[in-house]
Image (cartoon, rainbow, N blue to C red):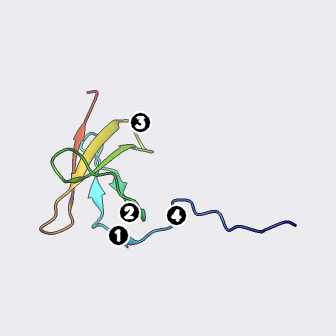
Amino acid sequence: MLIARKLVSPRLSPVSDVPDSLCPRCDALLMLRKGALPSIDSCGFESYSLECSACGAELAGIVDPCDDALLLTELTP
């Protein structure tokens, strides 16, 4: 007898959006869409790693819990 099971996996669809940010290197507009399972760092902040599609800068940042702003820094100048 076969039993069908529904597999549960993390959803990648947007749950909520953060305000748009600018790349610290080239000022390109970055639009981040938060997923269902955010990455939480050791300090309790939502943390993200991304690459700017305009200039290729490797970026890391956190979401400010007060206003949901994405605070970014460039990892490699």
Read off the residue under disc 2: 34
Q: Residue furthest left?
A: 66
| Real-space CA distance between mark 2 and mark 3, rounded to the nearest whole angstrom | 21 Å
Using a 10 Å C-alpha cutoff, classify the residue at mark 1 as few (fewer than 14 neighbours), some (14 to 19) or many (20 or more). few
Q: Is residue 10 left or right of residue 57?
A: right
Residues under numbered marks 2 and 3 in contact, where contact means CB atoms less than 8 Å apart: no
| Real-space CA distance between mark 4 and mark 1, rounded to the nearest whole angstrom | 15 Å
- Which residue is painted at 42% across and 62% down in the image? 35
Q: First in sequence: mark 4 or mark 3?
A: 4
Circle nearer the viewer, 4 or 1: 4
Read off the residue under disc 1: 17
| Real-space CA distance between mark 3 and mark 1, rounded to the nearest whole angstrom | 22 Å
Instruction: Measuring from the top left, give residue 69's x and y in whole percent.
Output: 20, 62
- Which residue is painted at 28% across and 27% down in the image? 76
- Amino acid at circle 1: Asp
Using a 10 Å C-alpha cutoff, classify the residue at mark 4 as few (fewer than 14 neighbours), some (14 to 19) or many (20 or more). few
Instruction: Measuring from the top left, give residue 47's x and y in whole percent.
Output: 27, 49
Circle nearer the viewer, 3 or 1: 1
Read off the residue under disc 3: 56
- Amino acid at circle 3: Gly
Q: First in sequence: mark 3 or mark 1?
A: 1
